[in-house]
Image (cartoon, rainbow, N blue to C red):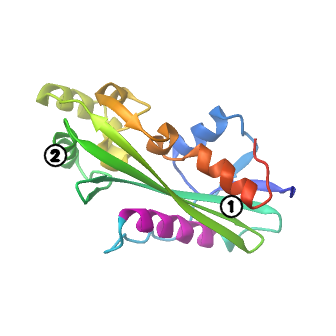
Amino acid sequence: MKQITRLILASQSPRRRDLLVQAGLTDFIIRPAPGEEMEAGEMPPAEAVREIARSKAHQVADTATPGELILAADTMVCLAGALLGKPRNTDEAASMLRRLSGARHTVYTGVAMRLDGAELTATEATDVFFRDLTDREISAYIATGEPMDKAGSYGLQGRAGAFVRRIEGDVTNVIGLPLYRVVLMAREMGVTLF
């Protein structure tokens, strides 16, 4: 196995940071990609999140020193072929939550790792089933401010956990970083993280 000098999380997401810490990985630094995030365009969601994560990793790689492992990710919510990003305002958040009410949707997270010029990318997909939500529940949830910085307008790790009837797949993927996939990718690069 290779020794790394440092793990760099190329993300500002507090959820990704928290997942790494909860898993016992505390020796990392946060260095978000400096440029604008690329748009998904016409790519299928699984490909789009992978390419966005790859772009983030490339941007941070320009500042990396030998031995630094870069970890980047991007998450999108897809409902019946439509991508639900972060809401721009409370009306958009309410609209997204109404669409997710009683429905199955898929959360895609693209993951990219770079180490000394070597690169791996992957995508994880998890199906999430919401119960029916009332307008009152949606309004109360929006009033917390919690949905405003999250793809699909909800955070599974917060109050919206009560909206979820069932999950098929990696729950950490829905939160923003599929730890299972991260460990496998690191092993493939010859690195043990945990």
Mark 1 falls on what kind of element? strand
The quadrant in which residue 27 appears is top right
Q: Measure the C-alpha gap from mark 1 to mark 2.
A: 36 Å
Magenta-tinted stretch: 45-60
Q: Residue at x 36, y 69 (%)?
A: 40
- Image location of residue 44, percent across then percent down: 35, 68
Mark 2 falls on what kind of element? helix
- On screen, residue 103 above or below 192: above
Magenta stretch holds residue 41: no
Left or right of 172, for residue 151: left
Left or right of 171, for residue 188: right
Is residue 34 at all visible to an observer of this figure? Answer: no
Give the tally of numbered discs: 2
- Image location of residue 121, percent across then percent down: 59, 65
Q: Residue at x 50, y 41 (%)?
A: 170
To which residue does mark 2 refer?
95
- On screen, residue 55 above or below 70: below
Residue type beneath disc 2? Ser
Q: Residue at x 23, y 30 (%)?
A: 131
Give neighbour class at mark 1: few <14, some 14-19, many 20+ (Cα, 10 Å): many
The quadrant in which residue 128 appears is top left
Q: Residue 70 got which mark?
A: 1
Residue type beneath disc 1? Ile
Give neighbour class at mark 2: few <14, some 14-19, many 20+ (Cα, 10 Å): some
The C terminus: image quadrant: top right
- On screen, residue 119 above or below 72: below
- Image location of residue 32, percent across then percent down: 58, 59
Q: Earlier in the sequence, mark 1 or mark 2?
A: 1
- Image location of residue 95, percent across then percent down: 16, 46
Q: In this view, which residue lies farthest toward the front? A: 168
The N terminus: image quadrant: bottom right
